[in-house]
Amino acid sequence: MSAPVHSLVPDAVRALAEADFGTVAQRFRDAGFVVGLPAKGILTVKGVQPVTRPAVLLSVGVHGDETGPIEMVAHVIEALSRAPQALAVDLMLCVGNIDAIAAGKRFIDADLNRMFKPDRGALAGTAESARADELIAATDAFFAGTGPVRWHLDLHTAIRASHYPMFAIVPDLIAEHGKEALIDWLGQAAIGAIVMNPKSAGTYSYYSSEHHAAAGSTVELGRVGTLGQNNMAQFVDASSALDALLRGEQVAAKTEPHVFKVAQEIVKLSDDFKMGFSRETPNFASLKRGDVIATDGETVYSVFHEEEMVVFPNPDVRVGLRAGLMVVRVN
């Protein structure tokens, strides 16, 4: 029998995947930081007041099968904790769906990244609903005691291939100065495309942006993979940019991201919902005016711009949830 994957990964990666902050927390505590563990899988590290520092919320594993960012962040935080005085921000590090990570599944009962809204309907009794409540409470408490410069980077990997392997979803409601700083950082992280999102789908990063004026983003860093088997070379630029952000430094921009706006949101209305293209269609695939995006009973979604690109197409979502976005390029 082959060894379990967890036995093959570095200790720092295994610890983060299992939401074990013991060693890292102690290093920051010994260096004089105010360290908190408000709930399982959540670590806060703050400088001694009254110095106001930027506040950075960093979340991974909101989907349990998206393991690459867990590995990347584990290495960044491990190195930083060994030189703790280099930390230039107040930090909240969050491991989202701990049980799903352990099970190697996307979620246990339902998608955690649709739970950051007050109305959860029939999903209110799910494991992910309870976990979202813990994350929201910790997020509210973290940002309540911080200054005006606030970030939330929610790191993911995508289910399907993409014409832009690295891309980000950015809430359009972010204040302009925060938006500019975030887009600049995304360029440092070699993010090729940014979708400006005008409407919440109940995601974690949108919650932080809407309720705490954070420069928040859902950042897609390549494809889903098995813990310990991700190609870490794909995260080099993102890792460098993240390390610099936490140390109060900057790195040169690796790219100028293409910016898109949402043309239409595709909502699954019934179990009759069918996409007008194959399940292998990549993110940012191009559709032309008049092409059928999806049918749902008598409802037909079709392209009405000269060109629209599809992002996050997923016919398997629950009825009532977003099954895809259609976007158009603005730069």
Image (cartoon, rainbow, N blue to C red):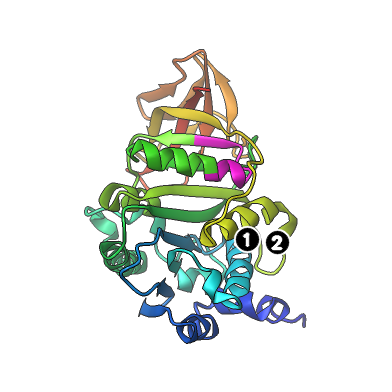
- Residue 230 is tagged as 2
Magenta residues? 185-194
Q: Please identify the residue farthest to the front as the structure is shown.
A: 51
Q: Residues within 10 Å of mark 2 (few under 14, many from 20)?
A: some
Q: Position of residue 329 (x, y in %)?
A: 52, 23
Q: Position of residue 138 (x, y in %)?
A: 31, 69
Query: From what the image shows, is residue 35 above or below residue 76?
Result: below
Quarter of the rendering occupied by the N terminus: bottom right
Give SS at disc 2.
loop
Residue drawn 64% across the image and 69% down it: 75
Query: From what the image shows, is residue 41 above or below residue 146?
Result: below
Residue drawn 47% across the image and 46% down it: 316
Amino acid type at circle 1 is Gly
Which quadrant of the figure has residue 69?
bottom right
- Residue 68 is tagged as 1
Q: Position of residue 293 (x, y in %)?
A: 49, 26
Q: Position of residue 161 (x, y in %)?
A: 65, 42
Count of residue discs: 2
Question: Could you tell me how far apart the alpha carbons at marks 2 and 1 are, in whole angstroms?
Answer: 6 Å
Tell me whether the residue at label 2 lies in contact with that at label 1, contact meaning CB atoms closer than 8 angstroms: yes
Q: Earlier in the sequence, mark 2 or mark 1?
A: 1
